[in-house]
Image: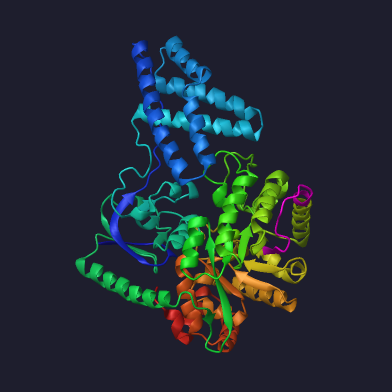
């Protein structure tokens, strides 16, 4: 048996075979062919295979996703018959005795270069379409498996270098036992995805994660960040028993999932959910969420080749808001940049994208994009309980600027005779240290705060949240981060403003007593955690937690703080 140590990224235990997730590399060689006619036939056959594949994806997209997604593939089908594009490839083969792969990649490159040079979002998106079709044809010609998940036929632990949001859309979640990644940290997107699905994950294991043989049995301990390869029978039994014990706790927590979270001394705390799509919204409600504490709207923007229209966004937001009716839904405006790129949007090349034009900064640079989203949100909020939240706010002026754009949207909707939510509450994420330090000033500008500890930790500790080498530092249990949280809550409460938390810290059993002691109003956690967080809160005395929190904030390290809570608060030791 071998053992690897990584970072505990999502709690739980998974036992199963390894599945190595790899993005296939397309290696193109230029070869001089003897028989040009044969090469042209080969190219034609590849077109027919690609046509069949795209037709299947089109049918699937039409059934499962939006019509806009399906349209991408119908445009790609047309491209296969485009006389200009395909004609040039055939000419290239004929004139140069070239193999189909090199002709295809050269012609495609000249088309995409030309489109990109037009410096226009529409043409940039078309370039991406051409690239997509080209890659598909190349895969067919080179005999490379279509998707990195081909061969994933049984429930497995997915091992990869790290997973991007786009990789994860390719995964059939029913076949995923958990995730084990070479890189990444506890707040990287793999971790957030795993928590959202209630699956265990270990990140930052190092390259050894990629060396495990496909099919090898492993135990993934998401609570301690340990991976056991080819474990002994007795260890499997031990972990299986642990899983059984967790199932008992889980059953109990789920029994009371729809009851409020009231402490032993009678104080009620809101427990909401972080969601990223309609499916998550439903799951959260089933698990007893009292609202949406964070709607990550990126889901509408990623994995596509053009911006979503106002109508498409309106429909998607409305579906979620209608589900929640009078329950609050905090809709966060677009947060891309950093490690989330939109291929169809001109984004600057930056040395430090996490410190660059991300989130609200990017929205200010693209006012039309921003206004389209705000209008869709305001329209969907009509008759529902919409709260609008701006991410990555660093200064009070940004809130005023965002409000001004919002007011312009309201005026335009009004002029167009459209109905909209005129009572939406306006708030910001507190996830940049300057916002926490100046929370007294910022609280004058908003109705509420929601603390984003994932970013607040990385920016406070100057430790990239996606970098496993500095994962120890990018830790929300650090007293520096907790002190900023205290300051934020105190400043907001002094003005009678509400403070929630949607960062991952809100779902940490050992953090909940401290956050209750600091007076946090709401805990927004991933759907599977809602019943557990409520259960823990019910076992606490809010008044007693005040002194524990003050003591904790005098300590010097995350380890000392966790040890203090572990020792003093029995219910926080819950094994989940
Ligand atoms: C955060 O930063 O804590 C947060 C909730 O936002 P995200 O993880 O989407 O950056
Ligand atoms: Mg954030």
Task: Please state the horizontal and vertical placement of residue 344, each as a whole percent of the image.
Answer: 59, 38
Is residue 545 in view from this perspective? yes
Q: Is residue 35 above or below residue 476?
A: above
Residue at image location 46% in from the left, 41% down from the top:
61
Residue at image location 70% in from the left, 77% down from the top:
493
Q: Is residue 16 left or right of residue 252?
A: left
Locate residue 318: give its quadrant: bottom right
Locate residue 126: give its quadrant: top right
Is residue 186 in view from this perspective? no
Task: Please state the horizontal and vertical placement of residue 103, each as a whole percent of the image.
Answer: 45, 19
User: Looking at the rendering, in which quadrant would you find the C terminus?
Assistant: bottom left
Counting the numbered discs, the total is 0
Residue 416 counted in the magenta span: yes
Residue 115 counted in the magenta span: no
What colour scheme was applied to this rendering of the protein? rainbow
User: Looking at the rendering, in which quadrant would you find the N terminus?
Assistant: bottom left
Q: Is residue 554 left or right of residue 156?
A: right
Range of residues picked out in magenta = 412-428
Residue at image location 72% in from the left, 49% down from the top:
364
The residue positioned farthest toward the left in the image shown: 233
Q: Is residue 240 above or below residue 299?
A: below
Locate residue 118: give its quadrant: top right
Task: Please state the horizontal and vertical placement of residue 391, each as a whole percent of the image.
Answer: 65, 58
Task: Please state the horizontal and vertical placement of residue 372, each as a whole percent of the image.
Answer: 68, 47
**Foreground residue, 514 or 149?**
149
**Foreground residue, 321 or 20?**
321
């Amino acid at each position: 048996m071998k053992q690897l140590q990584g970072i505990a990224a999502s709690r739980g235990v998974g036992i199963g075979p390894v599945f190595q997730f790899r993005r296939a590399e397309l290696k193109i060689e230029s070869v001089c062919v003897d028989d040009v006619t044969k090469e042209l036939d080969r190219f034609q056959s590849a077109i027919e295979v690609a046509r069949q594949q795209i037709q299947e994806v089109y049918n699937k997209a039409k059934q499962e996703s939006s019509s806009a997604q399906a349209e991408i593939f119908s445009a790609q089908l047309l491209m296969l018959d485009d006389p200009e594009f395909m004609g040039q490839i055939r000419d290239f083969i004929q004139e140069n005795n070239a193999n189909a792969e090199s002709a295809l990649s050269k012609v495609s490159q000249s088309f995409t270069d030309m489109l990109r040079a037009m410096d226009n979002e529409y043409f940039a998106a078309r370039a991406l379409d051409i690239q997509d079709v080209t890659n598909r044809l190349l895969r067919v010609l080179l005999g490379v498996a279509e998707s990195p998940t081909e061969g994933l036929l049984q429930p497995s632990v997915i091992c990869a270098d790290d997973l991007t949001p786009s990789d994860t859309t390719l995964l059939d979640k029913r076949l995923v036992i958990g995730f084990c990644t070479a890189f990444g940290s506890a707040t990287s997107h793999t971790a957030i995805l795993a928590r959202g699905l209630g699956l265990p994950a270990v990140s930052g294991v190092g390259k050894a994660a990629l060396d495990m043989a496909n099919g090898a049995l492993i135990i993934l301990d998401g609570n301690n960040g340990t991976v056991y390869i080819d474990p002994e029978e007795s260890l499997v039994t031990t972990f299986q028993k642990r899983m059984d014990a967790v199932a008992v706790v889980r059953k109990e927590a789920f029994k009371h999932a729809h009851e409020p979270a009231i402490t032993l001394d009678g104080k009620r705390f809101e427990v909401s959910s972080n969601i990223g799509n309609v499916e998550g919204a439903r799951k959260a409600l089933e698990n007893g969420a009292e609202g949406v504490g964070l709607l990550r709207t990126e889901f509408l923007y990623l994995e596509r080749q053009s911006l979503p229209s106002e109508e498409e966004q309106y429909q998607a937001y409305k579906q979620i808001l209608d589900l929640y009716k009078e329950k609050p839904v905090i809709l966060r405006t677009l947060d891309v940049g950093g490690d989330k790129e939109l291929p169809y949007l001109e984004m600057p090349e930056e040395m430090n994208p996490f410190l660059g034009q991300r989130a609200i900064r990017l929205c200010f640079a693209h006012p039309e994009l921003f206004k389209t989203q705000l209008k869709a949100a305001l329209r969907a909020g009509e008759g529902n309980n919409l709260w609008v939240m701006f991410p990555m706010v660093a200064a009070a002026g940004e809130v005023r600027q965002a409000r001004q754009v919002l007011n312009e949207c309201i005026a335009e909707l009004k002029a167009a005779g459209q109905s909209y939510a005129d009572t939406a509450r306006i708030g910001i994420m507190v996830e940049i240290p300057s916002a926490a330090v100046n929370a007294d000033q910022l609280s004058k500008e908003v109705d509420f705060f929601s603390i984003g500890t994932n970013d607040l930790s990385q920016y406070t500790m100057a430790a990239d949240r996606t970098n496993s080498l500095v994962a120890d530092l990018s830790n929300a249990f650090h007293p520096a981060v907790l002190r900023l949280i205290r300051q934020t809550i105190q400043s907001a409460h002094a003005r009678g403003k509400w403070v929630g938390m949607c960062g991952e810290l809100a779902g940490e059993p050992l953090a909940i007593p401290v956050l209750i002691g600091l007076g946090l109003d709401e805990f927004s956690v991933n759907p599977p955690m809602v019943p557990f967080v409520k259960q823990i809160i019910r076992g606490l005395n809010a008044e007693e937690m005040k002194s524990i929190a003050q003591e904790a904030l005098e300590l010097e390290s995350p380890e000392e703080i966790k040890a203090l809570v572990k020792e003093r608060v029995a219910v926080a030791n819950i094994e989940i």
